[in-house]
Image (cartoon, helix red, strand yellow):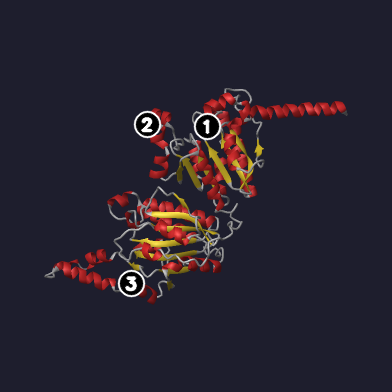
């Protein structure tokens, strides 16, 4: 018995030594090189994001056997389950110190298994990405590569079932960009992270173009210009904090209720400043973010894509402790006009909110959709349809509040009036709802009238004034196009009261089809 115990202890010691050999303290030389380009190691990132002692690693002792990539501890990816703010999540972290974080055969198998576990258990999937695509040392092998792998299939199946988050913390060309493209939220570190389907070397080989990594796929390109990522931050710590903040608004999966927090901001708090923020003059701009900040619980607003398509604002926030999604036109940018980028931004946000049970609150001040050759070159007809398509499929409560302009098809797309069966359609006294701008409609329909008049400009203004008399908020309420005209100061209280009455979900109203076909 003693000999058997000694044998078991010796075998356990071997296993423990194998674990220590892959831990950070045993890999000082490799990690010293890593720290020249990043603040945290792959394991330190997990340790910061997750609750201490909660990480249960999957496949820690994986190591390729033979071949050019045999010296690859954990095969370059650390994966497992852990708690983030008291909730179990599936977490993977690419290790750039192992062949540049490239994807090996066993590492791929680990990520696929982790995704399957997340799907079966209903756990959020968090991807801390810092690496290239398939590992050239092992990937240029038909015997291995022909099998492909089920990871993308798992991601597609999990979409809308569990929250999926990607933090791009360094190198991210090829595979990591494809992973992130499937995620609900993507954050990048400015000056450090990159995204794109191919890096500079491959671009040079394929097209002959010379371009730096940041010019090709840095945050200024992929966050601010293209909107491929949702947020650009200044450090890895800020990126990990953003991951935690994003998850705090969502349930663990689509069958769980959205997480509530104790409300410390009075539900009936009046927003006195709202009387002055939105000018009645439709030609004057203002920052709609200020409206959201006043209406929402204090300190609760978390904006998604704040530097992309600034003519629309999409923000998570809380109302009396309940997570909601705000969609608001931004008059400070293009007058709040809807462009293709704005429509894509709103469409994705609608889908995320609807998938995880967050009510939608629309703050409407829209002059319509962008027009002209430049707008048509962006295929706006399809992108606008995408925004409308997502709202038409939403089952969560939705409330619209017309702050000022509600013009044309833009009014429909922003859930105005009876367009998408809102749970409530509200308006402020400053609301002006009609088919198009007053000035534009006079110029289209009555140009001959006022141009033939002895005083054309005076006559034009008379026509404008006469038309404007028919589009005020009392006319909108008089025809029962809106449910109520409310005191702007009471917007917060009205929203909280209405959402307290609305069911969390509507019964599926769709015909007995297999699926809908997205416009784009």
Q: 64 above or below 421?
A: above
Q: What residue sits 81% from the left and 26% below the top?
A: 7
Q: What residue sits 57% from the left and 34% below the top?
A: 42
Depth-wise, is mark 3 or mark 1 nearer the camera? 3
3D distance between C-alphas at marks 3 and 1: 61 Å
Give x and y (percent) for residue 239: 51, 42
Q: Circle 2 — which element?
A: loop
Q: Circle 1 — which element?
A: loop
3D distance between C-alphas at marks 2 and 3: 54 Å
- Residue 229 visible at all: no
| Disc with the residue nearer the chain's start (2 vs 3) | 2
Q: Circle 3 — which element?
A: loop
The reply to whether dot 3 and dot 1 touch (C-beta < 8 Å) is no
Give x and y (percent) for residue 355: 54, 55
The residue carrying mark 1 is: 134
Left or right? Give the position of 385 relative to 90: left
Q: 468 above or below 254?
A: below
Left or right? Give the position of 131 relative to 343: right
- Identity of the residue furthest to the bottom in this view: 478
The residue lying toward the viewer, choosing from 214 and 58, is 214
| Disc with the residue nearer the chain's start (2 vs 1) | 1
The residue carrying mark 3 is: 472
Q: What residue sits 42% from the left and 28% below the top?
A: 201
Give x and y (percent) for residue 304: 46, 50
The residue carrying mark 2 is: 211
């Amino acid at each position: 018995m003693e000999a058997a115990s000694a044998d078991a202890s010796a075998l356990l010691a071997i296993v423990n030594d194998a674990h220590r050999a892959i831990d950070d303290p045993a890999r000082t030389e490799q990690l010293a090189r890593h720290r020249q380009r990043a603040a945290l190691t792959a394991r330190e990132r997990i340790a910061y994001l997750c609750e201490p002692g909660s990480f249960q690693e999957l496949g820690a002792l994986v190591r390729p056997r033979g071949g050019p990539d045999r010296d690859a501890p954990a095969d370059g990816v650390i994966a497992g389950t852990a708690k983030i703010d008291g909730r179990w999540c599936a977490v993977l972290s690419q290790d750039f110190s192992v062949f540049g974080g490239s994807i090996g055969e066993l590492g791929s198998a680990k990520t696929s298994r982790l995704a399957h576990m997340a799907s079966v258990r209903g756990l959020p999937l968090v991807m801390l990405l810092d690496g290239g695509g398939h590992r050239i040392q092992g990937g240029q092998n038909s015997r291995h590569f022909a099998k492909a792998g089920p990871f993308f299939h798992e991601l597609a199946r999990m979409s809308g079932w569990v929250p999926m988050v990607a933090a791009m913390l360094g190198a991210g060309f090829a595979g990591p960009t494809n992973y992130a493209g499937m995620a609900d939220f993507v954050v990048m570190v400015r000056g450090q992270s990159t995204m794109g389907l191919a890096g500079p070397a491959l671009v040079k080989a394929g097209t002959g173009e010379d371009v730096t990594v940041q010019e090709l796929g840095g945050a200024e390109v992929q966050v601010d210009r293209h909107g491929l990522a949702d947020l650009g931050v200044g450090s890895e710590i800020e990126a990990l904090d953003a991951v935690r903040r994003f998850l705090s608004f969502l349930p663990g999966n689509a069958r769980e209720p959205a997480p509530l927090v104790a409300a410390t901001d009075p539900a009936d708090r009046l927003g006195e400043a709202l009387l002055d923020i939105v000018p009645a003059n439709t030609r004057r701009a203002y920052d709609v973010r200020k409206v959201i900040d006043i209406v929402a619980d204090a300190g609760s607003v978390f904006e998604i894509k704040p530097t992309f398509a600034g003519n629309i604002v999409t923000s998570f926030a809380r109302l009396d402790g309940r997570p909601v999604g705000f969609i608001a036109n931004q008059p400070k940018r293009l007058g709040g006009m809807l462009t293709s980028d704005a429509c894509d931004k709103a469409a994705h946000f609608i889908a995320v909110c609807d998938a995880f049970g967050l009510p939608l609150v629309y703050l409407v001040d829209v002059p319509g959709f962008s027009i002209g050759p430049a707008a048509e070159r962006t295929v706006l007809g399809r992108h606008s349809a995408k925004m409308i398509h997502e709202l038409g499929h939403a089952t969560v409560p939705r409330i619209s509040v017309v702050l000022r302009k509600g013009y044309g098809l833009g009014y429909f797309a922003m859930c105005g009036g009876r367009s998408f069966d809102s749970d409530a359609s509200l308006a402020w006294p400053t609301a002006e709802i009609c088919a198009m701008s007053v000035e534009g409609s006079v110029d289209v329909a009555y140009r001959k009238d006022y141009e033939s008049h002895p005083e054309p400009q005076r006559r034009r203004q008379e026509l404008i004034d006469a038309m404007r008399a028919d589009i005020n908020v009392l006319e909108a309420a008089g025809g029962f196009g809106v449910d109520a005209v409310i005191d702007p100061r009471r917007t917060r209280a009205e929203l909280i009261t209405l959402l307290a009455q609305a069911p969390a979900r509507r019964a599926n109203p769709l015909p007995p089809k297999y699926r809908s076909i997205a416009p784009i």
